[in-house]
């Protein structure tokens, strides 16, 4: 089992990169895959053609709201995260054959994501051994990473955009990984679809990690995202998907 994390600032195309990575592994029959959506915007499910509400699958945030707000708290003697973990298996895991999916979801009440992150961390420790790949779509903010939702990962792909802040994001992310002692094998940098080719040399020479290339801007990918169509259904020869395949190939996948 290998765990791959995609991260980066908002709008760089990290969620579409995660979806196209799943498409690549499914095409190579390297399944089953677990997709983990850590972004409160919860776009990953839509990008792989899953309507969680229609499927009757709840997000972790929704399960916590039901358990600790609507139902009035946890059972005596059972730790809060343990009770949530059991509900994740019952109501929070989408099972789709080639891939399953868990979404942390939008938290509608005040407070941090500490409890959802803790519940997910416990759940992942139990379930990940059942999959060939675990693909984690991490949000722009680094708080989930800081709380070590995944304490051991194989590869991190930081998707950078056309701004100085994207370069700084790479440095901050690597510092957090080092300081909170997340186990990691490799850290890669990928140019998002808006990343200018003129900046690729800067990415190769100024950042302390391997730059794998950029995702090609593809009208068909953009159209699918805007219309809510699954990226898994894209033709295998579309430029955006081919560029992701090439990037993954450079990483050994």
Image (spheres, rainbow, N blue to C red):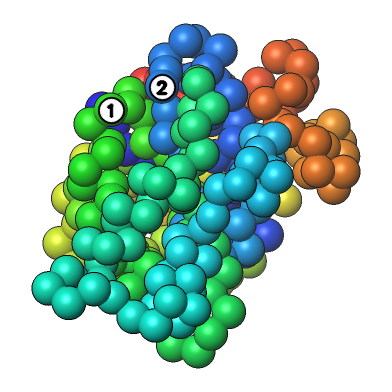
Q: State the image coordinates of residue 10 (x, y, percent, origin top left).
A: 62, 64
For residue 232, what is the image quadrant?
top right
Q: Which mark is residue 32?
A: 2
Q: Residues within 10 Å of mark 2 (few under 14, many from 20)?
A: some
Identify the image quadrant of the N terminus.
top left
Q: In the image, what residue occupies the spot 50% across and 20% down?
A: 98
Q: Can residue 88 be seen from the camera position used here?
A: yes
Viewer-nearest residue: 164 or 118: 118
Above or below, 30 relative to 95: above
Q: In the image, what residue occupies the spot 43% across and 76% down?
A: 71
Picture mark count = 2
For disc 1, the marked residue is 130
Q: Is residue 78 left or right of residue 66?
A: left
Q: State the image coordinates of residue 182 (x, y, percent, origin top left).
A: 20, 57
Whole-angstrom CA distance, mark 2 to mark 1, is 8 Å
Determine whether the residue tagged by mark 2 lies in a helix, strand or loop. Answer: loop
Above or below, 189 relative to 79: above
Q: In the image, what residue occupies the spot 54% across and 62% down?
A: 105
Q: Residues within 10 Å of mark 1 (few under 14, many from 20)?
A: few
Q: Is tag 2's residue or tag 1's residue first in the polypeptide sequence?
A: 2
Label 2–label 1 contact, CB within 8 A: yes
Q: Can residue 172 be seen from the camera position used here?
A: no
Above or below, 71 relative to 161: below
Above or below, 39 relative to 223: below
Q: Which mark is residue 182?
A: none
For residue 116, what is the image quadrant?
bottom left
Q: In the image, what residue occupies the spot 17% across and 69% down?
A: 78
């Amino acid at each position: 089992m290998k765990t791959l994390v995609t991260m980066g600032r908002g709008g760089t195309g990290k969620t579409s990169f995660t979806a196209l990575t799943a498409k690549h592994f499914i095409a190579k029959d390297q399944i089953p895959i677990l997709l983990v959506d850590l972004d409160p915007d919860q776009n990953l499910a839509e990008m792989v053609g899953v309507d969680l509400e229609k499927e009757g699958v709840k997000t972790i945030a929704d399960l916590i709201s039901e358990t600790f707000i609507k139902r009035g708290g946890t059972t005596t003697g059972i730790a809060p995260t343990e009770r949530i973990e059991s509900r994740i298996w019952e109501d929070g895991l989408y099972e789709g054959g080639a891939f399953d999916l868990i979404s942390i979801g939008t938290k509608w009440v005040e407070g941090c994501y500490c409890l959802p992150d803790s519940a997910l961390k416990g759940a992942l420790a139990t379930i990940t051994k059942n999959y060939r790949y675990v693909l984690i779509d991490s949000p722009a903010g680094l708080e989930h990473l800081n709380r070590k939702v995944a304490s051991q990962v194989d590869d991190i792909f930081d998707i950078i955009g056309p701004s100085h802040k994207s370069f700084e994001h790479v440095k901050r992310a690597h510092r957090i990984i080092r300081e909170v002692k997340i186990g990691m094998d490799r850290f890669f940098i990928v140019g998002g679809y808006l990343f200018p080719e003129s900046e690729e040399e800067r990415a190769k020479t100024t950042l302390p990690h391997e730059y794998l290339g950029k995702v090609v801007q593809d009208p068909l990918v953009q159209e699918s995202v805007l219309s809510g169509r699954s990226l898994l259904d894209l033709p295998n020869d579309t430029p955006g998907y081919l560029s992701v395949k090439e990037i993954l190939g450079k990483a050994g996948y």
